[in-house]
Each structure stands twice: as C-alpha cells, then as structure tokens.
Amino acid sequence: QVQLKETGPDLVQLTQTLSITCTVSGFSLTTYNVHWVRQPPGKGLEWMGAMWNGGGTDYNSAFKSRLSISRDTSKSQVFLKMNSLQTDDTAKYFCARQWDWEGYFDFWGPGTMVTVSS
Amino acid sequence: IQLTQSPSLLSASVGDRVTLSCKGSQNINNYLAWYQQKLGEAPKLLIYNTNSLQTGIPSRFSGSGSGTDYTLTISSLQPEDVATYFCYQYNNGFTFGSGTKLEIK
C-alpha cells in the first residue's frame, strides 16, 4: 500500500542546514509527484516545494534560494534541504503524494517535527 | 492565490449541520480540496475538485462552490469530526487556507 515517511533531526541549530528524507513505498517516484509541506506549531499549512515525476522541481518563492529538493529513485527517496535556519522554521515537515496530474495530495507522511534552537 | 477561511473557530452540537467557508482572492476554477487534520496527525483528504468525495470518507461530508467561493458541509456533526479543516487550491500554484477549528458544543 502507499506509504510515505519522513526522517530527520529533532533539533537543528540556528543558521544551520536542515536535511529531511521522505521514503516512499507502494508507488514510483517516476510516476507520481511528491511535495513538501510544513506546519509551525499551532499554525496552518505551508506548501514548500515539489519534486516532479520527471525529475524537475518547483519551489515556493517564500523560501527563495534556501530550499533544495532532490531524489534518489533507486531508493524511493525524496530529500529536502534548507539552509540558514531561523527559529520560525520550527515546524512539522510533511511529504505528500500528488494524485496523478491533479494538484491535490492523496497520501501524506506522518510528518517529522523539527525545532530550531539558538 | 490567497484563501480566507471562515469562521476560524466553530462550535456546534452533535447532529448539527455545519458549513465551513473558503474564499479565494482569485477564481479557483473548482480546483479546490478540503483536508481534515486531527491533533498530532497528518492532514486527511476529504474532498477534491470542489465536490468529489475521497474514497472511504463518510457521505455526511460534501463540498460545493465555484469561482472564488467554496463550502464544506457536514450534514450531521459527529464527535469524531472534531478537527481543524483546511481548504487548499491547486488552480494557480498551491495554497492552503488558514483553517477552521471545529469543536463540539
């Protein structure tokens, strides 16, 4: 069955780089797009970016050049890397599968909570 | 496209008919979905393309709307519906609303 799971650090130091891995099963990264969404504690959801099934990427301009998304199709993994972390980057980070060519997400990982510490 | 949800907090009784609103800053062309998020969990897809019910979602949930204005309706509120509900548009980029927190009165 379709599953996604995020793994990453619980704590990252201020100004350092965050790296999170999304490992998927039950579908191919060359067929489906995978997105990253984050949620600060007690707040709403924010779309961060996408890894397209063809290998391209798209980013929320709010993250400017801080964010990078990549993948390893042989390992069924999508990677998020974001640098220059600030305290307001403290959030739960989710990866989610986009259904077919439609833009909505049908499956989500449970998320991983990351705290940026000064 | 920015999405404005109202109300931000809704308190209703079990069995009530509940309506949640989502308004876009531009035409969304029906590319609007609704997600339910319970505390500590990932969002769960309820409705996509304005009014299509996701597999496995109870029929008491329904969606409607067009243009810039969309609605999620729960026909008979159940205790397990306590959650925050987010609308989400995918017509132009990808944007979430700020959420409506639904509680039982």
Image (cartoon, helix red, strand yellow):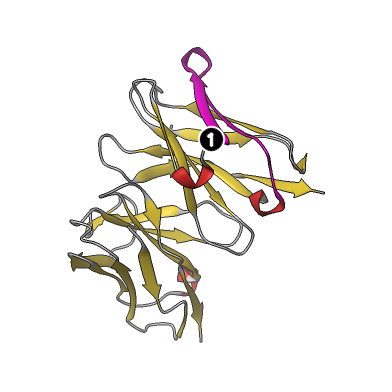
State the quadrant of the N terminus of chain A: top left
Residue A118 lies, with reference to residue A4, above or below; the image says below
B17 drawn magenta: no
Query: In the orientation shown, which residue stands out farthest toward the front?
Result: A64
Per the image, the residue denoted by label 1 is A65
Q: Measured from the top left, where is residue B27 in percent x and y?
A: 20, 60
- The one of A108 and A91 positioned closer to us in this rendering: A91
Magenta stretch, residue numbers: A65-86
Residue B17 found in image quarter: bottom left
Query: In the orientation shown, which residue stands out farthest toward the right?
Result: A118
A81 drawn magenta: yes
Q: Residue at x 36, y 64 (%)?
A: B3
**Chain identity of mark 1:** A
Would residue A41 appear left or right of A71 to someone viewing this image? right
Residue B5 lies, with reference to residue A7, above or below; the image says below
Q: Measured from the top left, where is residue B2 in percent x and y?
A: 36, 61
Q: Residue at x 44, y 85 (%)?
A: B12
Q: Measured from the top left, where is residue A6 in percent x and y?
A: 59, 36
